[in-house]
Amino acid sequence: MISCHKNVLDLWLIAAGLTYALAKGLAVPAQGPSLEQQIASINATVARSKAMLAEYTWQQQETISVKGKVQSQRLFEAQLGPDGRIRRTAMDLPDGNLSQTEKAGGMREWITQKKQHAALMYAQELKDIAETYAQVDPESLRRAYERGDVTNGQNPAGNGVKKLSIHNYVKAGDMVTIAFNPKDNEIQTLEASSYLTDPKGPVHILAEFVGDRDGLNHIDAITATGPKKDFSMVIRNLNYEHRFQRVR
């Protein structure tokens, strides 16, 4: 009788050991932040950086190219206005920074007078939509998540970068990919496929971000292209200066 009980106990111990080993082998690894938490963290970083940016002035160099040839280059002083939008003041460029076309008379030399106004309007529209996408809007991102239009993007293995894919972010049918560093939730790039008024006339936008030693995560450059018109615009942000004297 004792032998029988011992055999039963041995079998139970063996079964328990196998169950523990199986459970350990199938244990689910610790989960990272949820999609909602990732978006909340990015929005918090964006809000912090925008509040910091309001204390700076900087320069914007705007370069317009048609069919790969530089046609116009201008320099502006920039800062955030009370409404949170960038305000720019044109600055004079030294002769050495002007393109040959500008020296010869600017846009009047590379496009006919009849089409000049249309080209200027297109450039302005392209700049406006590029800056709309590049200045990440936490409210738009939150609404996209609530609609179910935000998903985790495909990430190259081992590069330490995560991506979010967002549909219908600014316009119906657009597509945005935000790449960010999950350690500090700072955005590295934002890429958008969109359009101005007609989806058949697409525009592509790439915004590249950098961080500085003060903790400001800001746009380094925006490249916007309208392939249908062979038109491209590059906006580079340069020479950031704090507007207030700091106590050292």
Image (cartoon, rainbow, N blue to C red):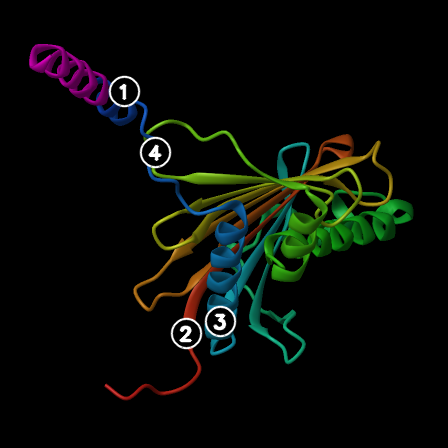
Mark 4 and mark 3 residues within 8 Å of each other at the beta carbon: no
Going by the numbered disc 4, the residue's amino acid type is: Asn
Q: Main secondary structure of the magenta part?
A: helix
The stretch of residues the image draws in magenta is 1-17
The amino acid pointed to by label 3 is Leu
The verdict on residue 15 being magenta is yes
Front of the two marks 4 and 3: 4
Whether tag 2 and tag 1 are in contact, CB under 8 A, the answer is: no
Seen in the image, is 17 located left or right of residue 32?
A: left
Mark 2 sits on what residue? 241
User: Mark 3 — residue?
Assistant: 53
Q: Nearer the viewer, mark 2 or mark 1?
A: 1
- Residue 185 in the magenta stretch? The answer is no
Q: Nearer the viewer, residue 16 or 25?
A: 16
Question: Residue 106 at x, y = what percent?
Answer: 70, 53
Q: Residues within 10 Å of mark 2 (few under 14, many from 20)?
A: few
- Give me the disc on residue 22: 1
Q: Residue 167: x percent and y percent?
A: 69, 40
